[in-house]
Image: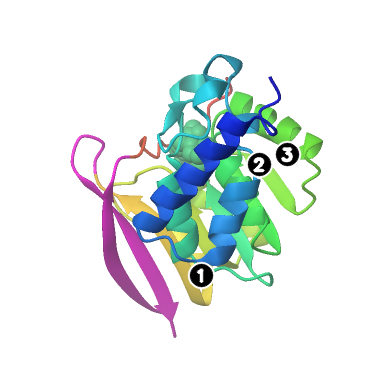
Amino acid sequence: MNQINSKEKKNEIINLILDLKKNGINDLDVLRVIETLPRFYFIEESIKSKANLNIALPIECGQTISQPLVVAFMTQALELNKKHRVLEIGTGSGYQTAVLSLLSRFVYTVERFKTLKTIAEEKLKKLEFKNIFLKHDDGGFGWESQAPFDRIIVTAAAPEIPNALIEQLTDNGIMIIPIGEDNDTQFLIKIKKNNKEIKSKKLIPVRFVPLLEGKKFS
Ligand code: SAH
């Protein structure tokens, strides 16, 4: 079945957008991107039918593609514009990466699983995204050779904010990161850097896979 044209799928997307609006997503650019970017491209064949539901889903390497509401919430909190250079830690499926790329100038994304990096890279290439650069590495160290970044988004939870990421944020930059232990309650934290001073604000409770140290070759 053609997922784009089916009436049922269109209704699912309308319901998803209504759900996002109900939950505080009011940035029209973010809503437009979520509405038009097909999430099913980034999901394994066997669960593609669930692509438009507002739920996290499993991807390869035991990781997850985040819930659309969380993707929308984090993207909205980043206050993006088309001049921004964005660093993403945790490419995963590449879905959040694609969302970011449609709202910014360049996206640099780091993934510790080579398999995930390779799959995401192929998909993003097929979809003709030209402003995304991918790297297989431990994202806890950021991407020093391309720093500084106007915006940083971390899509895996860390016990504390990695210093390297703070250093690679521009002055007036914004970082969104889930902080907390895996089994504890994690919170999304919004960090603003002004004149080297760091201000952080707790946003909402979340549940992310952990930000792990080292890069994995599988
Ligand atoms: N934004 C992704 C989320 C994937 S889950 C999506 O919606 O598809 C989080 C991702 O972070 C996983 O792919 C995991 O492998 C990756 N990750 C965990 N620790 C990492 C690290 N230290 N460096 C880079 N990526 C990491």
> Would residue 59 be seen by someone viewing this image from the given angle?
no
Callout 2: SS = strand
**On the image, numbered disc 1 is attached to which residue?**
79
The residue under the point 43% across, 76% down is 193
User: Which of 178/136 is in front?
Assistant: 178
Q: Quadrant of residue 114?
A: top right
Label 3 sits on residue: 124
Looking at the image, which residue is at 50% across and 58% down? 75
**Quick check: 168 above or below 116?**
below
Colour scheme shown: rainbow
On the image, numbered disc 2 is attached to which residue? 135
Q: Is residue 182 magenta?
A: yes
Question: For the residue marked with disc 3, what is the amino acid?
Answer: Leu
Residue 25 image-quadrant placement: bottom left
* Residue in view at x 68 percent, y 29 percent: 118
Question: What kind of residue is marked 1?
Answer: Glu
Q: SS of the residue at dot 3?
A: helix
Q: Nearer the viewer, mark 2 or mark 1?
A: 1
* Mark-to-mark CA distance, 2 and 1: 24 Å
> CB under 8 Å between callouts 2 and 3?
no
Question: On residue 95, which mark appears?
Answer: none
For the residues bearing labels 2 and 1, Cβ distance under 8 angstroms:
no
| Quadrant occupied by the N terminus | top right
Residue 148, given in percent of the width and then of the height, sits at: 60, 67
3D distance between C-alphas at marks 1 and 3 = 23 Å
